[in-house]
């Protein structure tokens, strides 16, 4: 099996089989603790950053009224938030959670939105593997018995996990 943030795209499904998705990457705004930028509209009139050439930079620009700064790397965006040169940044929520764990003076806000299958993470198995359903049952059990929650807390922290779980509870694609 392959368990490595792999998305079950149609192209990949031609050569491997996939479990049901187990992780649903969300977008998150990262800002200084207490700033409360929990929606893109709240960044209007502010300076916000994202990695150069990413969909995150495009999405910030699409809001309008945000001065968007594109930087070479996400750690540079984080540093400029910490230094006050940026009000916030737009990131993948799991990456943002790691930055918050490393920088307790920051907070993240998971954004509600649509997640499509091609953006989820699933477990890859050999094409037409008879073990796909077994893997799906294990994933369902891990969700039910709290093991998946514990893994999320280890990587996203309590607050990040709380926001993530609340966000995916509203996604039809996340229902097992």
Image (cartoon, grey):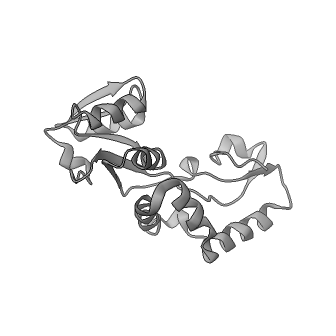
Residue 38 rendering spot, x and y as whole percentages: 27, 54
In the image, 148 versus 6, the foreground residue is: 148
Left or right position of 6 against 28: right
Left or right position of 170 against 124: left
Please tell me which residue is depicted at 71% across the width and 58% down the height of the picture: 19
In the image, 175 versus 27, the foreground residue is: 27
Image position of 2 with respect to 146: above or below: above
Residue pushed farthest bottom? 145
**Count of numbered tags:** 0
Residue pushed farthest right? 130
Image position of 51 with respect to 138: above or below: above
Please tell me which residue is depicted at 54% across the width and 62% down the height of the picture: 173
Image position of 58 with respect to 72: above or below: below
Left or right position of 100 against 125: left
Please tell me which residue is depicted at 78% across the width and 46% down the height of the picture: 16
Residue 6 rendering spot, x and y as whole percentages: 65, 45
Residue pushed farthest left? 45
Residue 164 rendering spot, x and y as whole percentages: 44, 61
Q: Quadrant of the C terminus?
A: bottom right
């Amino acid at each position: 099996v392959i368990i490595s943030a792999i998305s079950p795209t149609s192209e990949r499904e031609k050569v491997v089989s996939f479990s049901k998705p187990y992780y649903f990457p969300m977008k998150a705004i990262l800002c200084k603790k207490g700033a409360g930028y929990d929606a893109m509209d709240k960044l209007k009139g502010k300076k916000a950053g994202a990695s150069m050439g990413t969909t995150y930079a495009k999405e910030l620009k699409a809001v309008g009224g945000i001065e968007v700064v594109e930087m070479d790397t996400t750690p540079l965006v984080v540093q400029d938030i910490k230094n006050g040169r940026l009000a916030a940044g737009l990131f993948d929520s799991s990456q943002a959670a790691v930055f918050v764990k490393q920088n307790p003076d920051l907070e993240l806000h998971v954004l509600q939105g649509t997640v499509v299958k091609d953006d989820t993470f699933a477990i890859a198995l050999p094409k037409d593997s008879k073990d796909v359903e077994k893997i799906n049952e294990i994933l369902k059990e891990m969700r039910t018995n709290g093991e998946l929650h514990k893994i999320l807390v280890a990587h996203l922290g309590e607050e990040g996990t709380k926001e993530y779980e609340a966000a995916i509870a509203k996604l039809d694609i996340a229902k097992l």
